[in-house]
Amino acid sequence: MNDRLITTGTWSRRAFGLLLATVCTLSIAGKKPYDYYVTGNPDAPVHVATPPGTPSLVLMGGGPDVDAAFRWMITRAGIQPGSGGRFVVLQASARDTYGPYILYSNAQSSTTNPPVDGWTGGASLGLSSVETLNVPSVDAANDPFVNAVVARADAVFIAGGDQANYIRYWKGTELDRSLKALLARNAPLGGTSAGMAVLGQFDFSALRGTITSAQALADPYNKYVTLDPSPLSLSGGFITSPALANTVLDTHLDSRDRMGRLITFMARLVAPVGTKGCTGGILSASAARGIGVDVEAALLVQGNGAYQPYTARRVTNVSTISESAVYFMRPLQAPTVCAPGKPLSMSTVEVRKLADSDTVFNLSDWTGTAPYYVDAISGVLNPTNPY
């Protein structure tokens, strides 16, 4: 329906993983409202000497999974060789397992060798298990077993698929509360594609389906521009980390040309003041934020302690063939035209592009790379190729 993840770089190893899980691991299905796959031993003792003291988030733009991002989540959870640790993957529209890809170092299921490209090598880092849950209904999201698995996780990753399912089936459930509890104790949380799309304070929910940049720019109130929470509010969202306050996210930014729709989503957040702004908006223009992530890119977001800024770094795979960039965006002026049935006009949208893995971006003061500027004039972006 929306941002379904059909990954070419990772599909073969996850297909292999699903076959392996079917043979070597446990699958609970049938009468249960969920599907459950486990690789490794989730009942192994876990002795994390130093639990995470600050938040950790992974924003992955879809396409091939970024191996380094999973390794970072494992280490940020405080897991070390010999400590053990539980990694949980959530999804709502697939019967796939990430287990072998995250736990093993290669196709021979090594748990000790350094990982090769295309494998995480979690066991070599100290991980003892990976549990994958398919949670395709409200009943499943409220199931005690599902929430027990999530509650004891050391890190949780939300897979791709359709973010409308995550909003429909998970929001307001026990699973929602379990995920918020994980955030409260600083367990690393990440997502790719649709799984990333629900991690901002404001989400493109896709409850009526997806939308292109051209369609969104032509009418910011197009029926397919569905934002969560609805109506917009500073509370009542799905999963909200303080690191992503006032922020809406988008994925596959380059391959699906989504900068225009992300600009539209940001515009919709801006409250009306005089003749400017958007009806229903709740933020000042200077407060609204957007982060767009290319395919095969991951943004590693971390807290750094009290009174310290949230910072972010981009990683990708050594074998990537795309630019794999991240775009940090904010409007410097309120929209001058933002009304149902009318093309959007909002000038001077600041864009800061991060396309290397050395630069650290400061999310608290929105600095780290040089800015450039994009205008939306009567529903058309200038420059027309803003990437």
Image (spheres, helix red, strand yellow):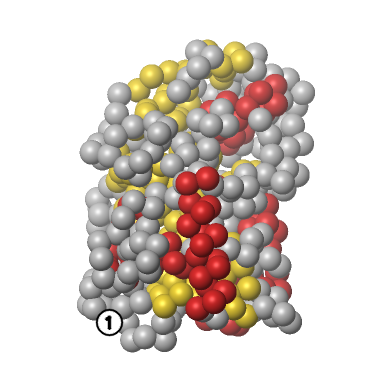
Q: Is residue 219 left or right of residue 331?
A: right
Q: Which residue lies furthest to the front in this view?
A: 108
Residue pointed to by mark 1: 47
Q: Is residue 268 left or right of residue 363?
A: right
Nearest the viewer among 254 and 336 is 254
Q: Find residue 215 and report its horizontal and vertical position in percent.
A: 70, 26
Report whether residue 78 is seen.
no
Q: In this view, does 130 lie to the left or right of 128?
A: right
346 up-or-down from 302: above or below: above
Nearest the viewer among 178 and 103 is 103
Report whether residue 305 is seen.
yes
- Badge 1: how crowded within 10 Å, few (<14), some, or many (20+)? some
Q: How many labels does the image show?
A: 1
Query: Looking at numbered disc 1 in the image, what kind of residue is underneath it?
Result: His
Q: Quadrant of residue 338?
A: top right
Q: Find residue 307 and report its horizontal and vertical position in percent.
A: 25, 52
106 up-or-down from 5: above or below: below
Q: Which residue is drawn at 55% across and 60% down?
A: 15
Q: In which quarter of the image is residue 336?
A: top right
The C terminus: image quadrant: top left
Q: Which residue is drawn at 45% across and 30% down?
A: 330
173 up-or-down from 241: above or below: below
Q: Residue at x 46, y 68 (%)?
A: 99
Check disc 1 and report its element: helix, strand or loop. Answer: loop
20 up-or-down from 311: above or below: below
Q: Which residue is drawn at 56% across and 52% down?
A: 160
Q: Find residue 210 and report its horizontal and vertical position in percent.
A: 69, 39
Q: Find residue 122 and report its horizontal and vertical position in percent.
A: 33, 66
